Amino acid sequence: MSNDWREGRPAAGGNPLLNRFAPMAAAAMLYPARRAGNGALKLIPGHVPLPDFVADLGGISPVLGRIGSLEVRLATTRKQIKQAQRLRYRVFYEEMSAVPNPAARLARRDMDGFDAICDHLLVIDNGEAGGVEKRKPKVVGTYRLLRQEVAERHAGFYTASEFDIAPLLARHRGKRFLELGRSCVLKEYRTKRTVELLWQGIWNYVRHHRIDAMFGCASLEGVDAEKLALPLSFLYHFAAPPGDWAVQALPSCRVDMNRMAKEAVDPKKALHALPPLIKGYLRLGASFGGEAVVDRQFGTTDVLVLLPVSVISKRYVNHFAGGGEV
């Protein structure tokens, strides 16, 4: 998942959307990563890169939705994942303020050890449907999806690099969790239609895998918490999770979200200051953990999004399942 679209790193405001990760090195493309007790990432040797053939999708169709010339689908080849990584690099590092490491700069791809174990949701523009000017298909949006059973077999969740999610998972043992991350959309495609298509894809994925709850990091542009006092305080006072869904940030990068008294928060102004991504999550019924995290490499302040499937209104469920406008 900065500001607009951040979810993956940069983007809020006109930005990408939830998780990303400081790429680790060229080898990180080939191996998932594991976090040591000191927070450092270690590559897990012996992991085989994704093959250049259709992956085993467990019975789910790669194509999860269409609107006009746009199609949302799961990546099934290494080439498609590289296209998603190039899009992330373009948005996070060229448009936004993230600073690439040498490996990412050389490859011009945003990449990390989690890419090899995640499913990658892509929005593809197939050109004028049936028109004379048929353009070459291109990836214009992406989201990274990590199911709990996959995370537990490999490196865990990316979100664990910022938030202490272990107690949350323990309290809800038996529920199926899905991590959403590293979302971004090409600037000229940042429209309601593209966002709806992404969520149509996510919803079909959630239904197929019988997911109970989604979570991930969403970003506010900037690392000065005082300048973000209004939106952070709004989320703290008006979008706090129930007690059994509360999550603490890791002490090394924790930021207090309760920076203004509830009476001093102007909800209208606060909503205006929030990235579109976070506003979209709020509309769906998401809550936000009571602590934030500063990510200086990406120049963002991250909050934890918590979205149990049960809280999504029937109106949106029907819409994502193929209904009309919402």
Image (tube, rainbow, N blue to C red):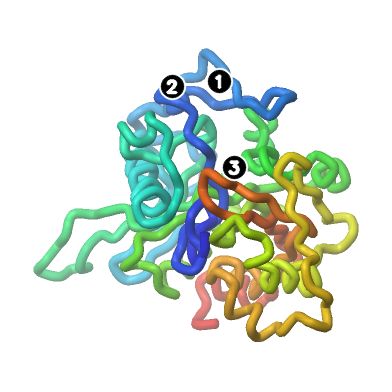
Image mark for residue 27: 2
Of all residues shown, which one is farthest toward the top?
A: 46
Residue behind mark 1? 43
Quadrant for the C terminus in the image: bottom right
User: Which quadrant of the rendered structure holds the N terminus?
Assistant: bottom right
Q: Tell which of 292 and 115 is nearer to you.
A: 292
**Could you tell me which residue is drawn at 51 percent across and 19 percent down?**
47
Give the mark, 2 or 1, whose residue is nearer the N terminus: 2
Tell which of 259 and 311 is nearer to you: 259
Q: Is mark 2 in CB contact (under 8 Å) with mark 1?
A: yes
Note whether 24 is above or below 137 in the view shown.
above
| Position of residue 311 in the picture relative to residue 185 (left or right) | right
Q: What amino acid is at disc 3?
A: Leu
* Residue matched to label 3: 146
Quarter of the image where one finds residue 51: top left
Q: Which residue: 64% across, 50% down?
A: 294
In this rendering, is residue 170 above or below 121?
above
Q: Nearer the viewer, residue 63 or 150?
A: 150
- Residue 309: x and y in percent read 71, 61
- First-in-chain label (3 vs 2): 2
Looking at the picture, tell me which residue is in the foreground, 113 or 154.
113
As helix, strand or loop, the secondary structure at mark 2 comes to helix
- In percent of the image, x 59 and y 51: which residue is there? 180
Q: Are marks 3 and 2 in contact (CB under 8 Å)?
A: no
The alpha-carbon separation of the residues under discs 3 and 1 comes to 18 Å
